[in-house]
């Protein structure tokens, strides 16, 4: 007895457990049992504090469950729609720049200024007069007057000044129409065929509008009149990679950099077609923007014939024997374009067989005549292209946007209508894109170049 008492006083506890059962008292100190008991009591007091509100919440939900059921049902349907439907690219709005009236030029003004420039001999003047008469261009297109300056040679200052005018003019109108803060623009894609500077034109836009530091900026050069659709294609892929973002696409060509001031007859015709212009387009991959967007991108098909030497050399920038640069367009370009268009339509036809409206690159009257004949199109089909060529001339990659602006101005774009834009460019390329109108589109009051 005395030995057992001594063991207990020294803290030793020896239990007598049934054979085969664990001896808990050997492994658990009694002070932890006491702490656990105290914790359990405090926990029960805490739960007792929350039990009445929880009971009230349960009674409320149970009583008003029929009322809450419908909103909850709609909420879960929206969640399912959000996660299961494929992402789309929406066109919120676009703007086409209309230069000031003092830059308008008639055909007679063109020839008179060309003669006064002293850059052209008599043969060159007569060739340009003849091309102008057959061009399909009217009396109100726009040209920078610097190209007619005696002794004019292409220079970066003139190119940058023209670029700033047309690019900033188009973007300013677009931002005013969409009310989008430039800080929310994630992607910028700008295309200009001939003028490529350092810093780039896209960097010029970022600097002017102070876009955010992580804007993904791309500058496409040397891709000709079809680069506008290439820019849309690139922006589409980037928007799919950055869901819930805005993309600004800008398309232009700088006339003061495409102008040829020499007498090589092979380089003179483009002088008579290219005119000032630019288009700015705001795209979005935010699903919520569907409700305010004008169009949804349906299909985009790009066809390249650059592997063929004849196609590759059909349009190129050259220098004459005096070192003056100009655009060369071969006599094979019509046939080259016909083959490229046929291949493009073969692909697009399997994807998108019907359209209500057509916007064909307004390059020249002869080109539009050939396309109308080959595709058996009506005058109504060609109306937007012919009117754009007449009013604004060939504005290169932005031309198809002036044509869509014409359709809007005439009130022809109705809900669910599909419009097919087709463009051609050096390389040789034929690209096309299909948009679906998401609503009846009235003519914009401010950012439509066709408004008086």
Image (cartoon, rainbow, N blue to C red):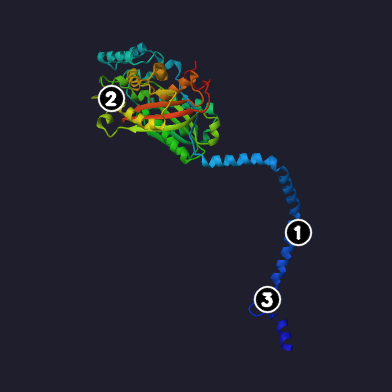
Residue furthest to the bottom in view is 2
Q: Is residue 150 visible?
A: yes
Which of the 4 quarters of the picture holds residue 36? bottom right
Q: Label 1: how many residues lie within 10 Å, few (<14), some (14-19) or many (20+)? A: few
Residue at figure coordinates x 25%, y 25% from the top left: 320
Distance between the alpha carbons at the discs numbered 3 and 1: 29 Å
> Is the Cβ of the residue at disc 2 closer than 8 Å to that at disc 1?
no
Counting from the top left corner in percent of width and height, residue 125 is at 28, 14
- Dot 3 corresponds to which residue? 25
Residue at figure coordinates x 67%, y 79% from the top left: 18
- Please give left or right for residue 327 compared with residue 82 in the image: left
Q: Is residue 268 above or below residue 83?
A: above
- Dot 1 corresponds to which residue? 45
Could you tell me which secondary element the residue under label 2 belongs to? helix
Q: Earlier in the sequence, mark 3 or mark 1?
A: 3
Q: Earlier in the sequence, mark 3 or mark 2?
A: 3
Could you tell me which secondary element the residue under label 1 belongs to? helix
Counting from the top left corner in percent of width and height, residue 231 is at 41, 32
Residue furthest to the left in view is 321
Could you tell me which secondary element the residue under label 3 belongs to? helix
Distance between the alpha carbons at the discs numbered 2 and 1: 89 Å
- Dot 2 corresponds to which residue? 335
């Amino acid at each position: 007895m005395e030995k057992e008492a001594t063991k207990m006083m020294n803290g030793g506890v020896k239990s007598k457990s049934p054979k085969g059962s664990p001896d808990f008292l050997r492994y658990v100190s009694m002070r932890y049992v006491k702490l656990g008991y105290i914790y359990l009591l405090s926990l029960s007091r805490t739960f007792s504090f929350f039990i009445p509100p929880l009971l009230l919440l349960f009674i409320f939900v149970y009583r008003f469950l029929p009322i809450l059921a419908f909103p909850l049902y709609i909420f879960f349907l929206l969640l399912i729609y959000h996660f299961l439907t494929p992402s789309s690219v929406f066109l919120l709005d676009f703007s086409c720049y209309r230069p000031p009236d003092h830059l308008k030029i008639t055909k007679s003004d063109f020839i008179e200024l060309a003669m006064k420039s002293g850059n052209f001999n008599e043969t060159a003047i007569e060739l340009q007069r003849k091309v102008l008469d057959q061009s399909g261009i009217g009396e109100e297109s726009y040209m920078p007057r610097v190209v007619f300056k005696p002794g004019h040679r292409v220079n970066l200052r003139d190119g940058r000044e023209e670029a700033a005018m047309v690019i900033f003019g188009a973007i300013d109108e677009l931002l005013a129409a969409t009310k989008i803060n430039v800080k929310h623009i994630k992607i910028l894609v700008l295309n200009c065929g001939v003028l490529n500077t350092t810093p780039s034109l896209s960097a010029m836009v970022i600097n002017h509008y102070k876009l955010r530091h992580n804007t993904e900026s791309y500058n496409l050069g040397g891709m000709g009149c079809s680069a506008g659709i290439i820019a849309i294609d690139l922006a589409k892929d980037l928007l799919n990679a950055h869901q819930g973002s805005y993309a600004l696409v800008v398309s232009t060509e700088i006339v003061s950099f495409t102008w040829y001031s020499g007498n090589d007859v092979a380089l003179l015709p483009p002088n008579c077609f290219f005119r000032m212009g630019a288009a700015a387009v705001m795209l979005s991959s935010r699903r919520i923007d569907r409700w305010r967007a004008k169009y949804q991108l349906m299909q985009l098909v790009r066809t390249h014939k650059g592997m063929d030497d004849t196609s590759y050399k059909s349009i190129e920038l050259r220098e004459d024997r005096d070192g003056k640069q100009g655009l060369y367009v071969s006599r094979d370009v019509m046939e080259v374009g016909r083959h490229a268009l046929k291949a493009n339509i073969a692909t697009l036809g399997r994807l998108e067989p019907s359209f209500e409206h057509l916007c064909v690159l307004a390059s020249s009257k002869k080109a539009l005549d050939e396309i109308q004949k080959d595709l058996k199109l009506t005058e109504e089909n060609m109306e937007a292209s012919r009117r754009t060529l007449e009013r604004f001339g060939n504005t290169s990659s932005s031309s198809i946007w002036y044509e869509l602006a014409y359709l809007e101005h005439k009130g022809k774009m109705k809900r669910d209508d599909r419009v097919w834009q087709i463009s051609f460019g050096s390389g040789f390329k034929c690209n096309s894109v299909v948009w679906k109108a998401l609503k009846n589109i009235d003519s914009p009051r401010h950012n439509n170049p066709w408004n008086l």
